[in-house]
Amino acid sequence: MIEPVIVVVVMLALIAIGAPIFLALGAAGLTGLYMTRGSMAFFFGPTSLFGQLNSFELLALPLFVLMGNFLAATPVGANLFKAAVIWLQWLRGGLAIATVGASAVFGAVSGVSIAGVAAVGSIAVPQMLDRGYSRTLAAGSVVSSGALAMLIPPSVPLIIYGAVSSVSVADLFIGGIVPGVALALALCVYIYFRALLNPAEAPMGEQIAYSWKDRMKAIGGIWHAVLLIVLVLGAIYSGIATPSEAAAFGAVGAFLVAVAIFRCLDLKGIAAVIGSSARISGAILIIMGCARIFGDYLNLVRVPDTITGLLIGTDLPPEAILMLIMLALVGLGMLVDAVSLIVVTTPILLPLITALGYDPLWFGIILVMNLEIAVITPPVGLNLYTLKAVAPMLKIEEIIRSVVPFVIIQFLMLALFVLFPAISLWLPNLVK
C-alpha cells in the first residue's frame, strides 16, 4: 500500500511549492490512477471530473453566489446593522449583539461568510470602537458571526456537500436552520454576559429614544432582501421549486433589488458583479472536479473501507470516534480551504459515519460546523484577513486574539450537536 502514500506526498509537495489546490488534487489523483490503471488513468480522470460537475443541483451554486454578490453590492448589510442597533441598543453589549443578528440575516442572504464579514464589519467595527467597545469584543463578534453564513441557508458549503454525498440540498437547508440559530443565540448570550461582567468592554453610552416610527423605518431598509430570502427558501421548503430553480429566482430578485430599488449598480457595476461571481463559481467548481479525481482514486484503492475497518476495529465508543474525526476536521480546516475539505473528506468519512449508524444529513451539518470554526482560526482563517482588509484600524494580532473565546463557544456548540444528533434532525423530520 505504498501507492496511496506516494499520492499524498505528491499532493502535499505541490501545495508546499505554491501550486493551486485544484492542480495539487488533480495531479495527485491522476498519479494514483496511473500507478493503478496505467494509461487508462487519462480516461478515468476526465470522466471523474465531468461526473462531479454534471449535476443539476450544482446549478444552485453559481446562482446563489450571484444572488449574494448582487445583494452585497447594495446597502443591505449596513441597513441590517442599523436596524439591529435601533432594536437592540438597550441591551448591554447591544452593538455587538446587533452585529451577530445582522450577520446571521446577511448570511441567509449571501451564503458566503467573507461577504458577511465585509458588509457588516466595515460598518460595525468603527461604530463599536467609537462607542468605547473593546477592540477584541468588536473584532471577535464580527469574525465569529460572519461564519454563520456557512450554516444558515442558502449555504454554499451545504450545496457542495449535497452534490458530493447525494443528500438532498433542500433537506440540508432545513437541517441547517436549528444549528445556525442556536449558534447565533449562543454567541449573543456570551456577549451579553461578557459585557455584563465587564461593563468597560461595552459601555452603554448615551441612550437614544427611538420611536416605533424609527424602528419601522429601519425595517423599511431591509424588507426587500428579507422578503426575497423568505420567498427563495419558502419555495424550496414547500416543494414548489428545486434549489436550482429557487436560486435562479433569487438571482433575478437580487438583481432587481440592486438595480431597481437601491439603484446602486450601473452597467459597469453589473458587469463587475457578474465577473466576480463567475470567477468565484469557476474556482469552486474546478476544485470540486479535481477533488473528485483524487477521491475516486482513494475509493479505487479502498482507502475509505480500510479507514472504516481500522476505526471500528478499535472498539472505541462511537462518540469517541466522532470526536477524533471532529478534531481532525478542524485541524485540516485550518490548513485547507472549505471546498477542498468537503469534497476530499466526504467520500472517505461518509462510509464510516453510516457504519457507525449516523445519518448522512446530520454529518453534513456537523461538517459545516467544523468549517465554521476553521474559517475563524489561523493560518487560513479567511474571515480574519477579510476583517483586517475592511477594518484597517485593527491589527491582525488583535483580531486573532479576539476569536479565542468565540472559538471555545463554537466548540461547545459543536460538541452539543455531535453528542445529541436528534437536535439537528428534529426540524427535517418534522417537515417530512
Image: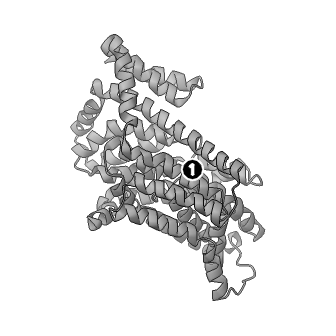
Q: Is residue 403 visible?
A: no
Q: To which residue does mark 1 refer?
A: 376
Which residue occupies the foreground of this view, 206 or 71? 71
Task: Return the x and y of residue 329 as percentages of the image width and height.
Answer: 43, 42
User: Who's the residue at 29% across and 66% down the image?
Assistant: 431
Residue appearing at x 50%, y 61% in the figure: 108
| Percent of width and height locating residue 34 | 36, 14
Which residue lies at the image location 52% right of the left edge and 21% below the top edge?
13
Horizontally, residue 417 falls left or right of residue 105, namely left
**Mark 1 residue crowding within 10 angstroms, few (<14) / some (14–19) / many (20+):** many
Q: Which of the two residues, 391 or 20, is positioned nearer the viewer here?
A: 20
The mark total stands at 1
Colour mapping used in the image: one colour
Q: Is the residue 87 above or below the residue 432 in the image?
A: below
Q: Say what amino acid the circle numbered 1 marks.
A: Ile
Image quarter of the N terminus: top left
